[in-house]
Image (tube, rainbow, N blue to C red):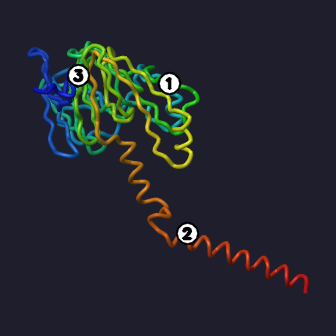
Amino acid sequence: MAAPFFSTPFQPYVYQSQQGSVTAFQISGGDVQVLQVMVKSQDKLTAKPGTMCYMSGNIQMDNNYLPENDGGVWQWIFGKSITSTVFFNPGPDDGYVGISAPFPGRILPIDLANFGGELLCQADSFLCSVNDVSVTSSTVDQRPRNIEIGAEMILKQKLRGQGMAFLVGGGSVMQKILAPREVITVDCACIVAMTTTINFQLQNPTPHRRAVLVFGGVNQLKASLTGPGVVFIQSLPFNRLSQRIARSVGAPSLRDNPRFFIQIVMFFFLAYVMIVSSIILTDV
């Protein structure tokens, strides 16, 4: 019987947690999901601004600047939010908060205790967290200075703690458990999160690849991931989805609208005729 072509298969992510540290939550919906988290008395839930959908009457909501938001002034200058929305339950009864995913995809419940208390993730993938979870800037990005302009930076955030964190990945999300010294090559934009035990190496584009990018090639950064560890991969990154939408509603290309090329030729021809006519009339 032939051996399988991979040792550890890609598989859908299934949430598992320790029996004594279960946080009650419910994920509803298909393509655009909604997360409902139970907030117990004196507990808090931290979420990205603008993701709250609904909440119970005994929950207090406030926008706070968290010290772990490194480089807050620079983030504010470049138009990024430097605050987080905190939901606190001051009463004796349990409450709940509904958090909506900002784009079509899957919400992933992550118990950081099962991943050694640390997890690297994309900046757009973090949705919310419960209690003992901090979000800080990550330094895993090893992009050299001479990389082509426009390539997105990846894995900007690191989650630390022993609580629950919820991430969101575009499209379908698969989990890959890497064995020791097992290597896979992935598109950097497709990485949702990965454990800190994985060795991350960005692959530099060749000179031929740079020449292709100049003439309209697809800018796709690749990275080599070496186990052991766990990586979560998304099929439709948000940047790729937004670029497709912008391309479809933007200026039409010559392939989609051949008359656009004819109009340009006619414009230059008429301009040439007017210039020549003005020169002839001036000489006369």
Q: Quadrant of the C terminus?
A: bottom right
Q: Residue at x 23, y 45 (%)?
A: 32
Amino acid carrying label 2: it is Phe
Label 2 CA crowd tier, 10 Å (few <14, some 14–19, many 20+)? few
* Element type where label 1 sits in the image: loop
Tag 2 near tag 1, CB within 8 Å: no
Tag 2 near tag 3, CB within 8 Å: no
Say above or below: 33 vs 197: below
How many numbered badges does the structure rendering display? 3
Specify which label sits upstream in the sequence, 2 or 1: 1
Specify which label sits upstream in the sequence, 3 or 1: 1
On the image, the x and y values in percent for residue 164 come to: 22, 22
Q: Which mark is residue 71?
A: 1
On the image, the x and y values in percent for residue 99 come to: 24, 38
Residue situated furthest right in the rendering:
283
Label 1 CA crowd tier, 10 Å (few <14, some 14–19, many 20+)? few
Residue that carries the numbered disc 2 in the rendered image: 261
Q: Which mark is residue 177?
A: 3
Q: Residues under labels 3 and 1: Cα distance?
A: 33 Å
Pick the front one: 41 or 14: 14
Q: Residue at x 50, y 28 (%)?
A: 204
* Element type where label 3 sits in the image: strand
Amino acid carrying label 1: it is Gly
Q: Residue 90: which quarter of the image? A: top left
Specify which label sits upstream in the sequence, 2 or 3: 3
